[in-house]
Structure formats: C-alpha cells, structure tokens
Amino acid sequence: MSEVATLPPVHAAAPDDGARIPRKSPWRLLSRPFALLPAAFLLLVLACAIGAPWIAPHDPFTPAIRHRLEAPGATYWLGTDDLGRDMLSRLIFGARTALLASFESVGIGLAAGVSLGLLAGYVGGWLDRLAMRLADVMQSIPAVLLALALIGVLGKGLGNAMLAVGLIFAVSFMRITRAVVLAEREQLYVDAARVLGLRPVAIMLRQILPNVSGPLIVQASISLGTALLIEAMLSFLGVGADSTQVSWGSMLETARQFQSEQPLLPMVPGLAITLTVLSFNLLGDSLRDALLPGGAAPARPVARKATPSAATTAADAETPTPADTLLELRQLSVRATVGGGEAELLSRVSLHLRRGEVLGLVGESGCGKSMTASAILGLLPRGAHIAGGSVRLGGTELVGLPEEALRHIRGRRIGMVFQDPNAALSPVHTIGTQLCDILRAHSRMSRAQALARAVELLDLVGVPDPARRLQDYPHQFSGGMAQRVVIAGALACEPELLIADEPTTALDVTIQAQVLDLLADLRRRLGMSVLLITHDLGVVADLCDRVAVMYAGQIVETGSVQDTLAAPRHPYTAALLDAMPRGRGDARLSTIAGRVPPAWAWPQGCRFHPRCAHARAACTQQPVALQEGVRCIRSDIQERAA
Ligand SMILES: Nc1ncnc2c1ncn2[C@@H]1O[C@H](COP(=O)(O)OP(=O)(O)OP(=O)(O)O)[C@@H](O)[C@H]1O
C-alpha cells in the first residue's frame, strides 16, 4: 500500500499552458451598472427589513387619530394613513413581511424542487415520468388560485399562502434541476466519479448539484419578485398578512379607500412593490448574463430505428488462460435497445490480461472498445445489458455482482483514465477536493491525511508544485497536466487494473508522448495491469505487450504485439497497419475503404467482408469463429503476403 506514496516523481513536468476556459463568476456583476443599481436597492430593502425596529422613526401599529391622513412633512416624512400611523415606518416594517414571505416560498420551492429534480434526472424511469406529470398538473393551476385554495383548506395566514406559492415554485426549480442533471449525468466526470466508486448521493450532491447553482440562483432571484407580488396581492385581498403584520399589499388596500382624501397615499406602497419586484427581475436578468453560458446546448443525437443484429457468431475456440491472469472476459455479449429494436453491441468477446501486462485494445471508432470497458466496470449505458458471458477480476466474477459490491471494486481495484481529461474532472471543485473525495470514499482518512496523500499522488504523476496546485480548478491546468491529475485520481487507491480509454487522443501531439511515457513508467514501477484502449497501432507498438484487435463488436485478432504488428493475420489488422503513419518518408497513407457499420447492421458472415479485398462468397455466408487468435477463413492470404 505504501508504494505509491513513497515513489519519486516519474516525469519531468510539461509546460502548463494555464487557464483556458473562462469561468463565469458572480463577481462579473460588479462590472454591470444595470445589475449594481437593483442590487443596491435590494440591499437597502434588506437592511430595512432587518433593522426595522431600530430604523423606523415611529411605531407602525399604534393609531394616532389626530394625525390621520396627514400630508408628508417634517414629522411624518411620507405622511400618515387613515389611523394616523406613520407611512414611512409602515413601509419599513412592510419590507420585513415582504422579504420573509418571499424567502419562505422560494426556500420551500428550492428545497422541494431541487431534491425532486435531482432524483428524477439522476434515477430516471418511472420516478422521472411521475415527477414530470405532477409538474404538468401543478403548472396548469395559477399560483394565486392554488394559494387561495390552500388558504381555504388550512386557514387564513401568510404562512399557508406562501407554502402554496412555494409548491408552485418547486415545479420550475424541479424542471431546471432535472434538465441540468440530464445533461450532466452523461458527462465524463460523472462517469469518472462512478468509476471511482462514489455513492450516487455523493455524486448528485457534490458533482452534479454545483452545476445547477447558476440557473437556480437566476430563477430564485426572479421567483423572489414573483413571490413578493403574490404576497402583496393576497394581503390586498385580505387573506395574507394579519393585523400583527404590516404588508405593502394591505397598505395599498387601505390607501385605495382614502385615495380621494390623500392622493399620495397609494404611491408609497405602490412604488415600494414596483421597485422591489423590478429590482429582483433586473438582478435575475443580470445574473443570467453573468452566470449562464450563452447559446443553447448542442442537441443530442437521436437513436435510429434498429433492426435485429446479424446472426450470432460461430463458437470461438476456447484458449486456456495463464495462471497469473488478472482479468478474463469470456464470451461476453452486450445487447442494447436502439430505437425500436435490439442490437448486439458486443458479440462473445473473450480476452485476458495478465498481472503486470499491458494489453492494447484497438479498432476504429464504433468497434466496441469503450463498450467493453463499460461492461468490465459494470457501467453500461442506459438501455444496454450484458446478455451473456463472464468478466472475472482476480477470481471475482463481476457479472451479476450487486451495485454496492461493484462500487467497491471500481476505484479500489480498477482505475479508469478517460479520453478527455477536462471532461473527466468536475469543473466546480478544486483538484484537491476531487482527489480527497476519491481517497476518502475508499478509506478512513482524515481530510488532512487525504490532502497529504493527494500531494504525493500529484508528485508521483509529475505535476510540479503539487501542494499549491491542489487549490487549482481543472480549467487552470493544461490538457497534459489535467490528464496527469486524472491518472493520479485513478491511481489513488492503487488499483490492480488500470483501464485507459484513448488517454491521449484529446491531447496535443507533444503532450501525448509525455502522457504515454508516464503510463509506461507507472506500470513498470507499480506493477499494474493496463488495458489500453486506442485506435492507434503506434501507441500499441510503444506501450503494449499484447494486442486484441476489435471490429464490429468482435475480437478479430489477438497476439503478442511483436508478432501481430510484424505479421498480421487478419486483413483488418493489416489494413489498420497500412493506415498507420510510419515517418516523414510516407508520401501517402492508405485508408480503409468504407466505415464500421452501426451495431444494428452488423453484416452477415464475416463482419469485415464488405470492406475486405480478400473476401470470397464463403466469407458472406457463415459467421466466422476465432481460431488460434484470428477470426478469418482467409488468414493464409495475409500470412503469404507477409
Ligand atoms: N448507449 C448506446 N446505446 C446503443 N448503442 C450504443 C451505445 N453506445 C454505443 N453504442 C454502439 O455500440 C457500438 C460500439 O460503440 P463503442 O463506443 O464501444 O465503440 P468504440 O470502439 O469505443 O468507439 P470510440 O472510439 O468512438 O469510442 C457502436 O455501434 C455504437 O454505435
């Protein structure tokens, strides 16, 4: 256990290109006069609400009939009402009622809406459908009507009224939260958190919730204005604030009656309501500009209608696995519902990985490499399921293991490095927090111990000045440095197996080599097994001991890197090799004609035959079995060519 902690840094630091993604911060508001004005006004209202008993020049409740309906003057700056009470003092106390009622309803709305939105978005299924139907029903009822109905049931009083308004608000907070959760739960950093074994509640609250804060703050600000207006309206109607409270709404109602005697009377509460609601709305607009990214989110691809996949494959020859095998996949099949039908995404995939070995899993995009990794981790996308076969990790069968047990294996025994490091890290937490979360999810460490360990891990992966960098956010790291951080996270619990899914594809070419060197060094020093997913045979040649080539959801060739790259036996492997740049002298690279078919349209017979120059009629008829590490009835052609 101590090996990781004591190892020296293995790699020279790459230059860090610093911050790249500007973060939206509430402080941007300071540069906007349109936001400062309403904010200042609302601060004034808040100060009045809090300090009313000390600020108000007169008692707002005790009548003084001899001063009734006085015009504004030296004693009563805003005049008096029909009972001779000071309008300014009532206005100041009214701020207290207005803000309390608004905060109460928005607080209720936030608590109920955000919890339900998180659950509906994250869990999905019937809970999501139920929540959405409920939201549709609630939104079809006007807020004031619902408040009046609840007052009818629970009795008069501002508390009941604002509870009803809060429930109405909950719907919009729920919709906003759910929409953000639906988008965020597909993000790599959420997958990364699941891979690292964080609990769903922790993922919802710590990883996803902070992303909703921007839209929620904006909506809350606008809802505060609406709530204030509803409170005033209910009090105006006489079903809101009672005689022990001063409300701008009831002040307006009184003023309405005596308007002919004192025309200025309605202006006082009227202006207070208008300006406060306007300020909330203007502040909401400015917050929207300051906190929310502009433009709509890119539309997600729509699944096409599926047809059942081609005939199942012929039985592959079973090969005995070595005694020091760490990971073994046997006849692993994954199926998924796509559009209206079922497709087989992985067909009887068998491969093994020995302790301390690096296995390259190669193939073009869409061949099933990532799906294989997801199946190993028990993190298949929605709609996909394991239809057969087994995944064994050091003697433990992972297929069918309960989620709780799988969670302990992910992160602790299997680490994962994703393609895009910036997407794999939560944008709203510092690196230190993220590494500590991983460490503390799997061991009983104090925060101080976890921080110390995080420094060691960053040092191990070659991040310079690790103690200082713990305070930085992911966007403050260059791509290469961010990938080192992701690798540090994957190594946090010293896993036996590291799965690296295209770990360098998103990086600059110069940085790619550094990250690959780091992986090679770590593997050598820590003795881990690595499953390296890549489409690049050059990377396989540099880093791997053995290779498994995938095409259309099947393994088509496996063998040692040396043998496979020197003398490929499958035409697909040969074609991948031909398409590989080998140096400056290459005038033109050959490409593989056509493209990988989608999973719902795998061809009959050999799945590569429509793109294969050596295909014969026999290749199109029967599924081809994997025999002695190759799935091709014409492998002799390649051998002869070699
Ligand atoms: N959620 C899903 N539902 C249905 N089919 C899917 C889903 N995700 C991927 N597929 C399909 O599964 C097949 C294998 O995809 P996979 O992502 O594993 O390929 P890959 O080789 O890893 O490609 P890449 O390098 O682009 O990630 C493809 O045909 C893909 O369209």
Image (spheres, grey):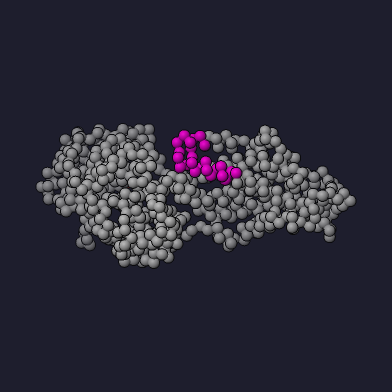
Q: Is residue 109 magenta-colored?
A: yes
- Residue 152: percent from left, percent from top: 69, 33
Frontmost residue, 52 versus 32:
52
The residue positioned 47% from the left and 50% from the top of the image is 206
The residue positioned 28% from the left and 42% from the top of the image is 396
Q: Is residue 138 left or right of residue 482?
A: right
- Residue 392: percent from left, percent from top: 27, 42
Q: Is residue 554 left or right of residue 456?
A: left
Query: In the picture, residue 464 is in which quadrant?
Result: bottom left
Q: Is residue 507 visible?
A: yes
Q: Is residue 252 left or right of residue 470?
A: right
Q: Considering the whole magenta stretch, tell me its main secondary structure.
A: helix
Frontmost residue, 113 versus 442:
442
Relative to 429, does residue 191 appear above or below in the rendering?
above
Q: Is residue 461 left or right of residue 299?
A: left
User: From which residue to which does the magenta span run?
Assistant: 108-132
Frontmost residue, 182 versus 191:
191
The residue positioned 76% from the left and 56% from the top of the image is 56
Q: Is residue 614 visible?
A: no
- Residue 54: percent from left, percent from top: 74, 58
Image quadrant holding the N terminus, namely bottom left
The residue positioned 16% from the left and 40% from the top of the image is 627
Q: Residue furthest right?
A: 66
Number of marks drawn: 0
- Residue 260: percent from left, percent from top: 85, 46
Q: Is residue 258 magenta-colored?
A: no
